[in-house]
Amino acid sequence: MTDVHDFSDICPYDDSVFHEKMSALVKEPMFQHAISYVMPKEAIPGLIDDLLKIDNKYDFQHLIMYPFLEMLAKKTTSGITIGGTKYYNSALNYVFITNHRDIVLDASFMNLAFLRRGMPTTEIAIGNNLLVFDWIADLVRLNKSFIVKRNTGIREALLAAKQLSGYIHHAILDKKQSVWIAQREGRAKDSSDHTQDALIKMLSLGGQTGAFMDNLKEVNLLPVSISYEYDPNDYLKAREFLLKRRDPGFKKSQRDDLFSMETGLLQFKGKVHFQMTPRINQKLDQIGDFKDTNEAARHVSRIIDQAIHRSYEIFEVNYIAFDLINKTQRFARKYTAEQKEQFIDYLNAQLDKVDVADVTAEEREYMMTLMLTMYSNPLKNKLHTILGE
């Protein structure tokens, strides 16, 4: 039975046990195998020696994760930028709520952007469905992550939600730690980002007043819009749509999830931009209280969605995809004919990677349309929010 006031099974590891947990982690063969993907094997013993000298999360992030993320950014992006830092007040702690683009890197790259500016990193919410091995759970909890329990029974789900909400409020109010959480469970496969009302209701369960809006204001919700120029998983999402079209009962395997994580981590993403927006407390005051929490959650979700959609960074590929899928030249001034041809070549090269037998021309066209939809939806949603289209 979950004790909603006991956070020991979900919270980041305390520094008092850091060395013990790290000592066990570095002996795990699968951990050593995993890091061999991102660094030369001859460098691994030196890394392990360095890890064993560390006894707290701060040093781990600053001495190990910071340079690792810089290396990853250099190898797999064309640069990581952040805007809207004027909305950040160092005297406050926030729940940074973002759209969800990459399984692993959304929070990691945001924290990298923070580290570069001397801002404190956040604690990170991560679903237990991704923690397929015990050593992965240990690694993320050593790296300031806390666990979101998923796939539970109805009664256990409510208790888990209360425990999670209680921990987030505890992190903000007592630990003085900011928190990152995605606006929904799982990524939006079509890149049309919308906040789940259930997430807002979960955040309202904790708090000191019991009032829905007051509990939300307590955690200082601050939307952050994440934009990736390229999504390395675009063809894998198209593949999943195709397999579900062929068989509505298709379910991804654990191997599929691990491969998606690996692809997102190691493959090229182009430019990556984070745009911070004002915290929404003032808007929560303006909309007031609701008798119905479902209606209240819908209004709060809409506020977050509008902030995220309005703040997307729109790249040339988004303009090209919008024009291609809508058969228009509306944004032709935003890109060159060469860029358009290069993007079409990119999409076709990605589709060539789809490992599904006997793909027909019609099915390939279906997947191409899906990929164009993924790349055009950020612009479509931004236009809807700003212009009402």
Image: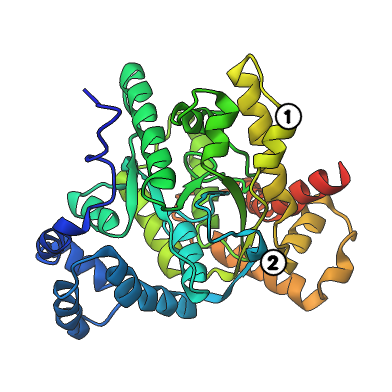
Give me the residue at 82% from left, 76% from top.
Answer: 336
Percent coordinates x, y for residue 322 in the rendering? 78, 55
Q: Which of 55/250 is in front?
A: 55
- Of label 2 and label 1, which has the lower sequence position? 1
Give me the residue at 78% from left, 62% from top.
Answer: 319
Give me the residue at 69% from left, 54% from top.
Answer: 372
Residue hosting label 1: 287
Percent coordinates x, y for residue 269 in the rendering? 54, 68
Residue hosting label 2: 344
Mark 2 secondary-structure assignment: helix
Is residue 364 something that shows in the picture? no
Q: Which of 368/87 is in front?
A: 87
Nearest to viewer (mark 2 / mark 1): 1
**Quadrant showing the C terminus:** top right
Q: Residues within 10 Å of mark 2 (few under 14, many from 20)?
A: some
Q: Amino acid at mark 2?
A: Ile
Q: Amino acid at mark 1?
A: Ile
Give me the residue at 68% from left, 29% from top.
Answer: 299
Mark 1 secondary-structure assignment: helix
* Position of residue 216 in the picture relative to residue 267 (left or right): right
The CA distance from mark 2 to mark 1 is 45 Å
Residue 22 in which image quadrant: bottom left
Using the image, determine if residue 91 lies above or below residue 62: above
